[in-house]
Amino acid sequence: MHLQNPINMLQYASENSFAIPAFNVHNLETVQAVCEGAVAENSPVIIQTTPGTVNYAGLHYVTAIVKKAAEINNIPIALHLDHCTTYEMVVQCVVSGYSSIMIDGAELPFEENVELVRKTVEMAHAAGVSAEGELGRLVGVEDDLEVSAEEAAFTVPEEAVEFVEKTGIDFLAIAIGTAHGLYKGIPKLDFKRLSEIRKLVSIPLVLHGASGLADVQVTEAVQRGISKVNIATELKIPFADTIRKRLNDNPKDTDPRHYLAAARDKVVKVVRHKIKICQSNDRASVLK
Ligand SMILES: [Zn+2]
């Protein structure tokens, strides 16, 4: 199959009370792990990269690898650009073949944020690519973006309605108490706020910062109307931990095929678990 525009996946998920997991990848092995896990669970999946990963791995490599993954695996796969703050990089990724983008103007005042998102969405739609926007700000570190507790803000339901109408985005990331990166303890989520936003906003909703949430919290968020669940840190940790342990245990082993394969296997397990929590398993066939 070709890379899919994820809007059909997300609308179907939204109508059927489950979520599409969106996994952040960094290299060939993490793309392979996400695909292997999704194929094993027969799940549609969104593969996403931050601008930092695009810069690290190279746009052409990333796009070529994920396009090939979509071609050889018989499940719907989308390629999404996560947390992009510039119009220019969105253009580059759209031209390169990304099927979905997120434009993040959260550090701008509301009106400027709306204007940046609106013009980016217009360009993406002209290319047949769907667009995610975010209102509210999550605390924590994502790539080069760091948001302190003072700067973080929960999404205001009425503002979300206005933001969606004015920008034309296809799905909305909301801030209800999750954080990017690691938590100190289990976070408390504002589920009432999520339900209020769900009542007022008709497009699919996205949960960022889902790594480190209890499974039941993700389940409840999905039941209350989250259709896309972003998972980044929870793949990074097992990947790094496995390599670290492997090399410590085998100080003479210099073969990347050994330690990277072990890390990849570990990530496959996490991917399969997250798919089950999102209840997207066995949903690939209806979306093909
Ligand atoms: Zn995020």
Image (tube, rainbow, N blue to C red):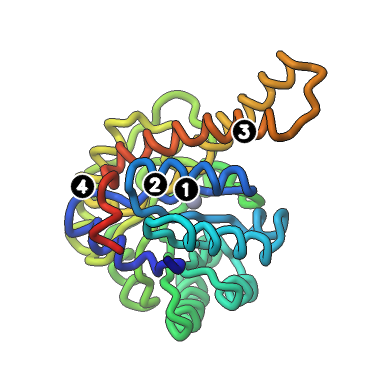
Disc 3, SS: helix
Residue type (three-letter) at the residue carrying disc 2: Val
| Quarter of the image that includes the C terminus | bottom left
Q: Earlier in the sequence, mark 4 or mark 2?
A: 2
Measure the C-alpha gap from mark 4 to mark 2.
27 Å
Residue denoted by label 1: 35
Is residue 235 positioned above or below 286 on the image?
A: above
Which residue was labeled with disc 3?
A: 261
Task: Report if the CB atoms under discs 1 and 3 are less than 8 Å apart.
Answer: no
**In the image, residue 199 lies at what x, y percent?**
17, 59
Nearer the observer, 126 or 213: 126
Quarter assignment of residue 67: bottom right
The Cα–Cα distance between marks 2 and 1, rounded to whole angstroms, is: 6 Å
What amino acid is found at the position of numbered circle 4 in the picture?
A: Arg
Mark 2, residue position? 39
Give left or right: position of 195 versus 90: left
The quarter holding residue 165 reads bottom left
Residue at image point 39% right, 33% down:
213
Residue to which mark 4 is pinned: 224
* Chain-order first, disc 4 or disc 1: 1
